[in-house]
């Protein structure tokens, strides 16, 4: 949703922000919202890259966004997957979305009220994780189905991209 999902990206050189995403995030920062990134990184369990790679990419993304006026308060990632090939990560967990564990951890660590929080995600698992954690509002970014099809987990709104979502939300 922040970046183009081109599949298991772990190098900053391959990281591409979605069109309009930086400006939309800047508007949220200016409006005073703490921004928390919650990301499934099963590429760790699958052996495509390491936790250190995830942490390095996170630092690069966060530093770049800071230079663009966007404050990322924290990033949480799940390195697990049941069909992973790296033994220590190949398991079921509560932190992989749609599990709520990382949302609960973020709220606790940063003293955030989940009921007053908003999830913006681009997969149904994001919406389900928000529901499971008690997040007040969940918006789905889906370029193919904007404003038409409401998936079973029923987001509060469906938008073609992050900019459209933030336009609506801050209006
Ligand atoms: Zn996990």
Image (cartoon, helix red, strand yellow):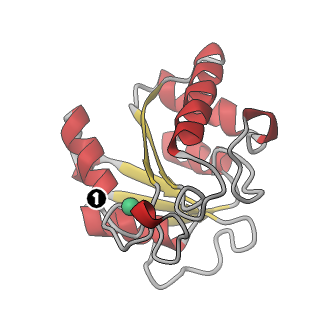
Q: x, y (%) of residue 85?
A: 55, 69
Can you give x and y, in whole percent of width and height, for residue 93 in the image? 33, 68
Q: Is residue 154 above or below residue 162?
A: below
Residue 96 seen in the current view: no
**In the picture provided, is 21 more to the left or to the right than 157?**
right
Which x, y percent locates residue 106?
29, 43
Q: What number of labels is visible?
A: 1
Q: Which residue is depicted at the point 36% across and 62% down?
A: 130
- Please determine whether, in this image, residue 28 is positioned above or below residue 134: above
Q: Which residue is mark 1?
A: 101
Q: Quadrant of ligand 1?
A: bottom left
Question: What secondary structure is marked by label 1?
Answer: helix
Q: Quadrant of residue 21?
A: top right
Between 59 and 84, which is closer to the camera in this rendering? 84
Can see residue 65? yes
Question: From the Cβ of disc 1, is ligand 1 less than 8 Å away?
Answer: yes
Residue 61 image offset from top left, x and y in percent: 62, 30
């Amino acid at each position: 949703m922040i970046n183009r999902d081109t599949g298991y990206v772990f190098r900053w050189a391959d990281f591409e922000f979605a069109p309009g995403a930086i400006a939309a995030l800047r508007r949220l920062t200016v409006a005073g919202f703490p921004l928390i990134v919650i990301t499934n990184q099963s590429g760790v369990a699958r052996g495509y890259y390491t936790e250190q790679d995830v942490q390095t990419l996170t630092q690069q993304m966060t530093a770049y966004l800071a230079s663009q006026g966007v404050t990322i308060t924290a990033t949480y990632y799940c390195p697990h997957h049941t069909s992973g090939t790296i033994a220590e990560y190949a398991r079921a967990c509560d932190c992989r979305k749609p599990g709520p564990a990382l949302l609960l951890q973020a709220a606790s660590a940063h003293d955030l009220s989940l009921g007053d929080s908003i999830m913006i995600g681009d997969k149904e698992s994001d919406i389900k994780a928000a529901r499971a954690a008690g997040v007040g509002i969940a918006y789905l970014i889906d370029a193919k189905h904007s404003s038409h099809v409401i998936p079973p987990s029923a987001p509060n709104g469906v938008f073609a991209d992050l900019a459209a979502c933030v336009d609506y939300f801050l209006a």
